[in-house]
Structure formats: structure tokens, C-alpha cells
Image (cartoon, rainbow, N blue to C red):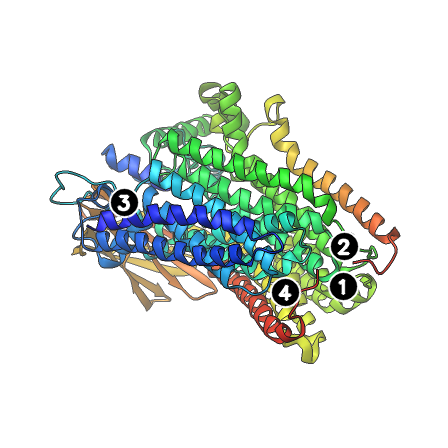
Amino acid sequence: MTGEIGELALCLALALSIVMTMSGLAGARENAAMARSVAHGAANGLLVFIALAFGALVYASITSDFSLLNVAQNSHTLKPLIYKISGVWGNHEGSMLLWVLALAIYSAAIAASKRGGERLTSAALGVQGILALAFLVFILLTSNPFVRLDPPPFEGAGLNPLLQDFGLAVHPPMLYAGYVGLSATFAFAAAALITKERDWARAARPFMLSAWIALTLGIALGSWWAYYELGWGGFWFWDPVENASLMPWLVATALLHSALATERTGAFRSWTLLLAIASFSLSLIGTFLVRSGVLSSVHSFANDPERGVFILAMIVGAIGGALALFAWRAPSLEGGASFEPQSRETALLLNNVFLAAAAATVFIGTLYPLALDALTGTKISVGPPYFAITFAPIFIALLVLVPFGPRLSWRKGDLAASLRLLAPALGIALVAAVGILAFTAPRTLFGAGAFAVAAWLIASSVVDFRARGRHALKAGALASMLAHAGLGVTLLGISGTTLWRSEALEVLGPGETTSIGGYTLRFDGVKAAKGPNYDAARATITVLDDGRTITVMHPEKRIYPVEGQDTVETAIRTTIISDLYLALGDEREKGRWVIRAYVNPLAPLIWLGALVMALGGFAALWSRVGVARASTVAVAEPAE
Amino acid sequence: MKRFFLALLFLVAALPAQAAPAPDALDNPALEARARNLQKELRCLVCQGESLDESNASLAVDLRRLIRARIKAGDSDAAIKIFLVSRYGDFILMQPPFETNTYALWLTPFGVLIVAAGIAVWVVFRAKRRPQGRA
């Protein structure tokens, strides 16, 4: 029954998405209150039925209903409950269902939001309806999770053990909340073009911010997971799949900043619209890259060209349609605002210049090898050195300029005064650079520069905070301080790990020791251990400092007999300042094992910084909600 | 992520348990450091986007040995790279070469930066000349 309920719910959702599209677009006209209320109802109904379908799939997975092909292929009775649930989106069909669930949640949120005009909201629902329609057709035709199996097998095939992990249970929903949140921004931008509503950014802002927060956290979670699960101590590999999530983040960051100016002074109105279109297009391209099997990596669960072509058609439709609408309507929206060269507007413009170049770099670095291979058959690799030469300088230049933005006033700012105010931060940055050059090895200009920039970002946020005095806690200011300081914290983590990482790779027998970064590691042997659905070889390694035992660590190797795969479970001891990271390799001869040990100084700051950035996003969101509450009385009728 | 793919490949193919590079290390630390650096700049050919330094694939193990043998024999880093490119193509280089079919790849980032900066300058000057007070 579960499968039929789910499939029926999907079909009803499809019907509702058609209703939502038509009534939403019809409601964009003046006297169409009826159509608008139908669109709102359809948005809520869409959420109910997609949630029902999603619930049905979760229920089938929890109860191990192997009569569903999807469950039989991806689950197993012995799998722990949390992975039975997260396994739902650990495969293609389920993850697409999660995608439309997120879309439906955002649609219902748009219907509930009171920030835009009635016509704008209605048109936005219409655009969301088109997206829901396209994705539901895609699911029902090429990726139906409710396909039956007759006869049902006695046991399921299990889930890739690498996906049986807490970080990877949370990472996809977070990332999708970001990708799909950008669909809401996109919908508002398209709606603004349809209704010629100039104040759309104000209505779209909460969605923009939630999408950005979710993307920030989603990317950080993915990177953290790669760090502790892959066993090499790296945190970012410039893997196409990682890049696919970084591109929308870069453009969404540009959008957040550009929209600030549009909302406040009316500057960059068409550019902000274009960024809204671009950020969601990149989300779609990211989905395409990951889902189509164009990149063979662990993320592409299926290599099915039919799906790839379908998603490609959706991308072309969405981008082409939106750009055509833009070309047609944007000229009538352009207001233009006057500002001096020294102003917040110029700062935001520069932010966009660098972020656009950074996003273009990631875009071409990711797609160029694919295009070159397809066109000429030449295979090249675009690895980390490419991004170190292109992306890194562009991004570092951006970071150097970041602290000036919040210190410059709208329309007419004073650069010299900002510089005077930020002088202490500049001093701290210089001291940091000199200190790094004088007291640490290896002595590199790059290292000194990276630490100086990180110190500059953090110190100028503090200076900014102090200079604002009593107003510092106003959420708008708090948001930029936190987000910018978070960038500095992440940069500290990246620089520390990259520069000072030490590594030991040894074959050790019981009782033997090796030393790394001031610690002595004593290998006390390996014991067999048993988990719910795996067998593990569990090492015991005692960490000593000057002969004193600090801690005992247990890196593991796990073998999942059902799936016939094994995983490395690293052991990490963190002091926030530094990580001691152990991974167990293979058994070389009887009782002697390969042990990989890393000391990664400052590594935890990479993710801590992302958390601080996300807090900045929350502060901005909170200020918005606060402002909205305070101004609903004053601005009951939004200005036309 | 590639590491996975590699790990999967490795396990599924049930290759003999070749472990990471430790036991093959050169005695001379300076030469070993050169080998490690080279390994990081070269790509494992059978796994997705992993460097030779990180890979457990048997081909990567062989190539790591080959690099060390060449270093011991007195070859320069450049000579080793040229040799490997002649055998496996540019694909083995983590950093793509700068040549006719990669000009676009290398120049786009800075091209976009320059064009965008030019547009920004134009926008700023236009905004300055515009009469005050319009929103």
C-alpha cells in the first residue's frame, strides 16, 4: 500500500503544481484575488502531498518494505534506524524527492510570507509551480522511487557504507535547503520581471538569507565529513562535486550584497535580478553535474543519460526563459541611483566584481576538462594547483577589501576616515605577518600574507564593533561583523593546516612508538570489534607527551559484509587549536599495521569559521524579521 | 570524494593489500621530499582526481616507485614529468599546461576580473554624474 499511496500523492502533487502555475501567474494581474487565493491553497496542498509521498518512502525504508525497488536496492534490515531514514536521500530517486519536498516547503513559505505585494507573491508562486511541475514530471517519468518489485527479495542490498555516517545524513538536506532556497529567490526575481515590481528584493531577502545560511552550513558539513571520513586529513579537494556547491554559494554571496544596495538605494537593480537568476541556474547546474553521471564520482549514484538530458533541458528552459524575460522586462525596471566613488555602493560593486570572477574561475575549472574532452578528445586534469594560481589570489584580494565595506556610508562615504578607524586592525595584521615570518617555519611570504589577511578580517570586525558603540548590536551591523570575522577564522584554519601540517606514516607492531608534532604515539595493538552491521578492526593507540599519557585513541577499519565494502574511521583528538588525526591502514605482517598520523594545526577553525558566518546570516535574518514586525503597521500598503 | 572511488575500486577489485607509501621511502630526506612533492603534482590515473601521493591504487604504487628510481638515478623533476607526460599525456599533470587548448582555461579568470572591473568603473562614473535624489 505504501508505494501506491506515495505514487498517488506524487500524481496529485503534479496536478496541484499545474493549478499553482496557472492560478499563480493569473494572480499576477490586478483584479485576480480569486486566482491568488487558489494559488495559495495549491501551494499548501502541494506541500501536504509531497510530504505524504516523502513520508511514505521514509516509512517504507524504516519498515524495510523490499517490495519497493528503491528500498530493496538501498536498504537492509540490519541498518541502524538513523541510516534507514537518511538512506532515503542517499540515492538518486529519494534525493530528487527531497529536492521537491524542499521546493514545496519554500512554496508554502512564499504563500505565507507577507513581505511582498499580493501580485508579486502570486507570480512567484506561479514560477515555483513551473519548477515543481518540471521536477515532478522528471521524478514520475525517470526517477520514480515507488516502482514495485515482484517478487520482493527477502533482504535489501544495503547502503554504501561511506554514506552511513552522521555528517552525510545531514549534509544533503542542508545543501538542498540552500539550492532550493535559491529557487525562491529566482521565483521572486522572475515575478518582479512579470509584475514590474521594483521592491522585490525586500520580499525575497529572507529566502535569500536562509538559502545562503543553508549553503554555507551544507558546504562546511561536506568538507568536515571529507576530513574525518576519508582518512587523508584534507578538507577541500576541488572535486567537481564540491565545486558544484561552491559556485552557487559564491554567486549567492554576491547576490546578498548586491541586493542590499538595491533594497536600500535602488542601485544595481537589473544586476541583482541577473544574480538571482544566475545563482539558481548554478544550483540547477550543480544538480545536473552531480545527478547526471557526467562526473563519475561517488555522488553520481546513477549513470543514466536519459536523466541527464532531462535535467539539461530543465536548465536550458529555466536559464533561457529567465534571461528572455530579463531582456524583455529589465529595461523598464532600471531606476539607477546616484552615488560617489567613495561609498558603500562602490564597495558592494567591488565585492561583486571579485565574487563574479571567483565564480567564473570555479565554473571554467570544473567544466573546461569536460568540454575539452567532449570537443577534442583531449584529456586534461584541472587540480588544486590550478585553483591555487587563479582562485586564491582573486579571493584573497576580495578579502583584503572586505573590511572597508561596512565602514563606508551609503551614497557618499569617506575612505580616509575608514582607513584611520581601521588603522589598529591594520597594525594587528602587520604584527601577525611579521610574527609569522619571524617565529615560524617554513618561512613563506604566502603564509605570512594569509595570516595577515585573516588577522585583518577578524581585527577590523572587532574595531567596527567597538566603533559602533551602542548601535553595534543592531542586527544588521552584527550580521556583517560576524560573517566577515567568520571568513577570517576560516582563513586562519586553512592557512594553519596548509602551512604547518605534519604527517607520519609508519608500520608499527605492538608496543612500538613513533612521534609526531611533539606527541609520542604508542601502538598497543588491534582488536576485533562488532557493530550493528559491520565488523571492525579497532586499534588502540596511546598518546604520550613527555612520557605522560594524554589520551588513548581508537582509529578503526570497518568491513560491511552486506555491501562488501570497508571504510576507515579516523580518530581525532581536537584542542580547537590543533587536531591530532589518526587513521588505521592495512595489516602488513602479523600484528604490524600501517598507521597514518597527522597533526593539523588550526584545522577546527575552518568549520568554526563557517559556523560564525552562518551565525552572521542568522543575525541578518533576525533583523529582517524584527524590521518586518516593526514596519508592518507603518507600511501596510507597499509603495507601487 | 575521489578517495572513495579509489577505495571502492580497490576493495571491489580485491587487489593485494598494498599500503600507503611509507615502506618505499628513500633514505635521503631531501630526495624523499622531492619525491613527495612530485607525487602531489601528479595525478593517479585510475582514480578520480586523486594525486599519486594519496592514492592506494596499484598503478599509483608503481608510479611512486618509478619516481623514486628516477630521482635516485639523478633525473631532474622536470625530466621525470616530461617522461611521464610522454607516456600518459597531460592528464597526469594536476596543473594543466599553458598551451593553445588551455589558453581559455587559464585566461578566463583574470579576463573576467578585468572586464568586470572595467564595467564597475564605468558604472561608478555614470552613478556619480547622475542627478541626486532619484531612487
Q: Is residue A111 left or right of residue A559?
A: right
Q: Is residue A282 left or right of residue B62?
A: right
Type of amino acid at the residue the image marks with label 2: Thr
Question: Which numbered disc, 1 or 3, marks the residue that appears first in the sequence?
Answer: 3
Label disc, if present, on residue A346 of the rendered structure = 2
Question: Which numbered disc, 4 or 1, marks the residue that appears first in the sequence?
Answer: 1
Return the residue nearer the eye: B124 or A317: A317
Type of amino acid at the residue the image marks with label 1: Leu
Type of amino acid at the residue the image marks with label 3: Asn
> Whole-Å distance between the Cαs marked 2 and 1?
9 Å
Residue, x 70% and y 41% (percent of image)?
Answer: B113
Task: Name the residue tied to disc 1.
Answer: A408
Tag 1 and tag 3, C-beta contact below 8 Å: no
Do badges 2 and 1 share one subunit? yes
The quarter holding residue A302 reads: top left
Do badges 4 and 2 share one subunit? yes
Tag 2 and tag 1, C-beta contact below 8 Å: yes
> Whole-Å distance between the Cαs marked 4 and 1?
13 Å
Question: Which chain contains the residue that carries disc 3?
Answer: A
Question: Which chain contains the residue that carries disc 1?
Answer: A
